[in-house]
Amino acid sequence: MKLYTNKRGDWAGTQATARKLEGSYIGVDVPVSKADLLVFLNDNKVSSTATAEDKPPPSLKDKPELLSQDAASWVSWAYERLRRGKKGDAEAMLLKGLQIQRDLTKDN
């Protein structure tokens, strides 16, 4: 069995999840017997409490090109309305999303 680590304390059970970890990752062979597996997990401080999905998203200060989750939701909704020909609804939703983003990045 394999687990993947970036040697910074982050572990993943699949390569797809490992790609989301910061930095490059390597595959590590893990014992399959329960007793040996528990020893390996404890010795290497492998924990299920911290995964790539659990990490907070990058701050808008660090990556201003990213939309906040709220703004992205409004923009996505606006795009769907636009695709369905509801231009007026789409404009209102897009403006709402952009206003949210502007308010969040004002201080940055």
Image (spheres, rainbow, N blue to C red):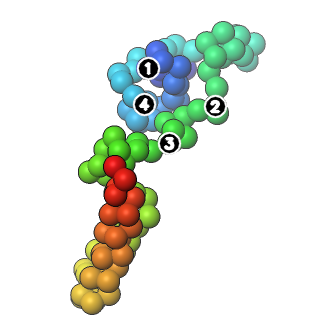
User: Image check: 49 left or right of 5?
Assistant: right
Residue at 30 percent across and 75 percent down: it is: 94
Tell which of 4 and 91 is nearer to you. Answer: 91
**Residue 103: percent from the left, percent from the top?**
38, 63
Q: Is residue 46 above or below residue 21?
A: above
User: Image check: 25 left or right of 32?
Assistant: left
User: Image check: 30 left or right of 6?
Assistant: right
Report if the CB atoms under discs 1 and 4 are less than 8 Å apart.
yes
Distance from Cα at disc 1 to Cα at disc 4: 7 Å
Q: Label 3 sits on what residue type?
A: Pro
Single out the mark in the foreground, 2 or 3: 3
**Residue 107: percent from the left, percent from the top?**
37, 53
**Residue 41: percent from the left, percent from the top?**
65, 17
Distance from Cα at disc 4 to Cα at disc 2: 14 Å
User: Along the polypeptide, which appears first: circle 3 or circle 1?
Assistant: 1
Rendering quarter of residue 49: top right
Residue at 36 percent across and 24 percent down: it is: 23
Distance from Cα at disc 3 to Cα at disc 1: 18 Å
Q: Which mark is residue 56?
A: 3
Single out the mark in the foreground, 4 or 3: 3
Name, please, the residue furthest toward the front.
107
Circle 4 residue: 21
Residue at 26 percent across and 51 percent down: it is: 65
Circle 1 residue: 6
User: Along the polypeptide, which appears first: circle 1 or circle 2?
Assistant: 1
Rendering quarter of residue 82: bottom left
